[in-house]
DNA sequence: TGACTTAATGTAATCGGTTACATTAATTGA
DNA sequence: TCAATTAATGTAACCGATTACATTAAGTCA
């Protein structure tokens, strides 16, 4: 069914049909009704794709969202936040999953551009930063979320990661720990660096010496957490507490700790990054730095939609604050451990 | 940048540019190189949207995925499965989230059709079944996943829910339980009904009388699980075991059980539906019916892609089998409880 | 070399809409 | 009632690609 056919059946011109469909121009009441009747009868559905060819100012209905791991609850809550805002604006979200692979990321972005999405929200890998900057400079609306690559003039929505990890580590120190292991994510990502920075600052502030063998990277995956604990426990002086910088690695840590028959928090205290719905169902309930994933998504989507409407302007950085949710896995205050 | 401009700059016709771009027809080596050079220099990116207007047999790069709760790990693993297969086929996935709202569902489907997605995978609500059938009859490729509405001639990929819940309940019975609470999902959905059926069959088979007050519906949300436990515990003869038919409700159950200072499995045994990455980190580790969410997604996507290539054929139902992952939350064999 | 075949390229219609401009119908006013 | 004005509708070009068909250039062979 096309406008042409509708026009023929209704006995009017394509222009009239188009006018009726868009409701803008003046059409006689009776004509409009007749056309609408045909539209209904024929079950006509407009081809937005064709429409957009002509109407350039009308953007596509689609907003892109590129994330790195849809299966990670943190990102799925980001996605939900984005989706809620986007659909509230009568748009739809096209989600792609990169698995931290820059090539997939680039492929997806190109596909989205080919498909003429109106803008994109992206959790960037480290691989395509120049490409992104070019796109934005070309006028493609884009917002980065969770990660904040340096030296880019692109809107970002991120968390104050340093503050989050600082507070977590501070808490452990306050509870008497002085050998604290740090399980980092993917090297080179802003959030990894920032979380490390918070850890270092907390230690430094308390005059605790930084030991390289207490700093381990687990690539943000569960297995990485397991390995980190194995590594820590094989030290002659293992840490008495661990700060793990994302939820999957934390889960890996906990499982490994159980496996080694160690007690939380007596043998080893733990604080994780990312609060999850199951964190309080663990025994002992897990102390976490709560990242407002949903809000990150909401903010990113709102920023993007603002950009879609207002076009260019200087780039903006939105920084949300984390919250330390204290539960029992980090132990309680005491003096002189280990 | 358009084909026209490229043609002008390269000093050839649009037809030649198109031929070079598509690599199909014969173009002189030297001409092709010259055109490609301009394409590179000008940073030209083809407008697939325009292309599709003409090339009808070439489907869009986009496959739609409509799920009901992107934030539920089960669905996000389904999404991941779909996404992996789709992107392996050099396509992209457009995900929409309905929150179980049929109106949003319909809106999204229409948007996808307008955007000319090549087909869709959907976790259907109960609200738009006729609409779906119409679409499929009109030749729109569609696969339903997780839920299997009756009387539709549409491909489905689902779980043998009845078997899953039968085995879980059977396990509880084998362990000596005779008062077993059932926490159901959303009434009217096929999976809810099937899970109930498995529960009923297991009881019947063991000659256990079915009690209506041990059957409660929690709408697949965490709060529903909490309320179910509250309701059960307020009975004069509370159940000694609970089977909860999805992960969120299970989490709610567990939290409420802890809150009431009850012991799992001594005071109350529990088996959940959906295995989650955190299930084995709970204490005691949670016995679950493992739904292969990822595989459901993979199968759905493969089925859809087959449809995209081969067109119409009789509809197919793929049924995957669940697996009971026995951990400690369901207790162990003993005789004559309660 | 020139007639004929084949390879390379160009021209213009087309997909399904929108819209500037042209045209026709209805309304107004004296 | 009829010219002038305005409202309603129609005609045709256009968006950015593809492609059937037409045309021109390059080979081939006697």
Image (tube, coloured by chain):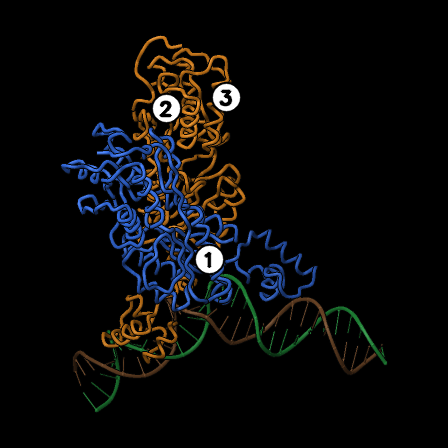
Chain colours: A blue, B orange, C green, D brown
In the rendering, at what x and y percent does residue B27 appear? Answer: 27, 73
Q: Nearer the viewer, residue A243 or D28?
A: A243
Label 2 sits on residue: B271
Instruction: Identify the residue at image location x=43%, y=66%.
Output: A314
Label 1 sits on residue: A303
Q: Chain of mark 1?
A: A
User: Disc 2 and disc 3: Cα gap in Å?
Assistant: 18 Å
- For the residues labelled 1 and 2, say whether their Cβ atoms are less than 8 Å apart: no
Tell me the mark number nearer the camera, choosing from 2 and 3: 3
Is residue B322 at least partly visible in the picture?
no
Please indicate whether residue B276 sits to the left or right of residue B219 in the image: left
Asked if residue B36 is positioned above or below residue B49 in the image, the reply reads below
User: Pointer 2: residues within 10 angstroms few (<14), some, or many (20+)?
Assistant: many
Q: Earlier in the sequence, mark 2 or mark 3?
A: 3
Where on the picture, by quarter, is residue B250?
Answer: top left
Q: Nearer the viewer, residue A283 or A76?
A: A283
Instruction: Identify the residue at image location x=44%, y=19%.
Output: B181
Instruction: Identify the residue at image location x=38%, y=76%.
Output: B5
Q: Chain of mark 3?
A: B
Asked if residue A28 is positioned above or below residue B110 in the image, the reply reads below
Asked if residue A153 is positioned above or below residue A75 in the image, the reply reads below
User: Pointer 1: residues within 10 angstroms few (<14), some, or many (20+)?
Assistant: many
Marks 2 and 3 belong to one chain = yes
Is residue A162 at least partly visible in the picture?
yes
Label 3 sits on residue: B231
Q: Nearer the viewer, residue A238 or B154?
A: A238
User: Disc 1 and disc 3: Cα gap in Å?
Assistant: 44 Å
Disc 1 is placed on an element classified as helix
Q: Chain of mark 2?
A: B
Image quarter where the C terminus of chain B lies is: top left
Please indicate whether residue A129 sits to the left or right of residue A216 in the image: right
């Amino acid at each position: 069914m096309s406008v042409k056919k509708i026009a023929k059946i209704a006995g009017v011109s394509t222009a009239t049909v188009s006018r009726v469909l868009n409701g803008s121009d003046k059409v006689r009441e009776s004509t409009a009704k007749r056309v609408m009747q045909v539209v209904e009868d024929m079950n006509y559905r407009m081809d937005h794709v064709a429409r957009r060819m002509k109407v350039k100012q009308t953007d596509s209905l689609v907003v892109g969202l590129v994330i790195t791991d849809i299966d990670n609850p943190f990102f799925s809550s980001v996605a939900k936040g984005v989706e809620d805002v986007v659909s509230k604006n009568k748009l739809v979200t096209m989600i792609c999953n990169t698995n931290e692979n820059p090539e997939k990321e680039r492929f997806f972005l190109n596909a989205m551009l080919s498909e003429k999405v109106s803008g994109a929200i992206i959790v960037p890998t480290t691989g395509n930063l120049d490409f992104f900057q070019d796109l934005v400079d070309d006028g493609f609306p884009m917002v980065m979320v969770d990660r904040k690559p340096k030296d880019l003039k692109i809107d970002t929505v991120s968390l104050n990661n340093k503050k989050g990890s600082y507070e977590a580590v501070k808490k452990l120190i306050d509870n008497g720990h002085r050998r604290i292991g740090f399980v980092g994510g993917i090297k080179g990502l802003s959030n990894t660096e920032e979380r490390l920075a918070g850890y270092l600052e907390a230690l430094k502030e308390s005059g605790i010496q930084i030991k390289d063998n207490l700093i381990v990277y687990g690539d943000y995956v569960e297995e990485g957490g397991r390995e980190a604990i194995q590594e820590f426990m094989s030290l002659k002086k293992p840490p008495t507490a661990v700060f793990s910088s994302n939820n999957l690695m934390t889960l890996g840590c906990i499982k490994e700790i159980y496996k080694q028959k160690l007690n939380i928090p007596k043998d080893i205290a733990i604080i994780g990054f990312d609060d999850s719905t199951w964190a309080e169902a663990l025994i002992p309930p897990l102390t976490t730095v709560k990242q407002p994933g949903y809000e990150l998504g909401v903010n990113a989507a709102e920023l993007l939609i603002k950009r879609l409407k207002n076009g260019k302007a200087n780039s903006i950085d939105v920084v949300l604050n984390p919250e330390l949710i204290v539960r029992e896995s980090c132990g309680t205050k005491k003096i002189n451990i280990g």
